[in-house]
Amino acid sequence: MMGFNHGLVGGAIAYYLPLPIALPVALASHFVLDALPHYGMPHEARDKSKFWKIFFTIDTLATFGLAAYAIIDRHYAMFLGGLFAVLPDFIWVGRVIRTRSFDLSNNDNWFTRWHVRIQRLERPWGLWIELPLATVLFYWVILVLWYR
């Protein structure tokens, strides 16, 4: 699932729940979203795909922009909820930067092995689920919740 979608869902959770409860729920939401059909492709294709690299870069920048916007607009709880919802993917970002590959198959601990296994529905056609989801979530979280 896109980091942007994870961040928006985590922010919405932190909006509705008290912070001590919201943070573990936002963290758990990451794995629920990753178990749903979403965009992805085998790592061999990711390493060669210009579209994937552009998509990954835009998603990363949009997610950091969302975080910055939450801080600037003083939505600290929503920022923390979004951060906790995105947190499990930071493991992958570090590996991608270190190895210069999107190969996530060499998992040396139980957590990363489990995290990869729950993403069985990661498919190229998942883009048609993630982009409309991002649009709806963006409208709901930013335009409805933040400006109530």
Image (cartoon, rainbow, N blue to C red):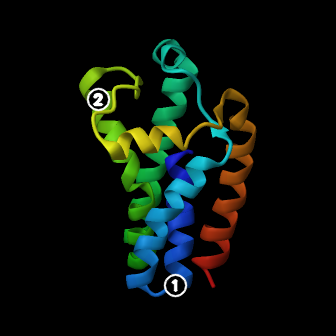
Q: Which residue is mark 1?
A: 17
In terms of secondary structure, where does tag 1 sit? loop
Q: Quadrant of the N terminus?
A: top right
Say whether residue 57 is left or right of residue 99. Answer: right
Amino acid type assigned to the residue bearing label 1 in the image? Leu
At horizontal 46% and vertical 51% (from top left) the residue drawn is: 63
Is residue 76 visible from the viewing direction of this image? yes
Left or right of 128? Residue 97 is: left
Q: Residue at x 41, y 52 (%)?
A: 64
Residue position marked by numbered label 2 in the rendering: 97
Quadrant containing the C terminus is: bottom right
Choose top left, top right, bottom left or bottom right for residue 140.
Answer: bottom right
In the picture, measured across the screen, residue 79 lies left or right of residue 51, that is left
Disc 2 crowd, CA 10 A, few/some/many (<14, 14-19, 20+): few
Q: CA distance from mark 1 to mark 2?
A: 34 Å
Is 82 positioned to the left or the right of 96 in the image? Answer: right
Residue 135 in the image: x percent, y percent? 70, 54
Q: On the image, which quarter does residue 94 sit in?
A: top left
Q: Vertically, is 41 above or below 117?
A: above
82 vs 139, nearest the viewer: 82
Q: Is residue 115 above or below residue 30?
A: above
- The answer to whether 16 is drawn above or below residue 137 in the figure is below
Can you tell which quarter of the image residue 16 is in? bottom right
Report crowding for label 1: few under 14, some 14 to 19, many 20 or more residues within 10 A (C-alpha). Answer: some
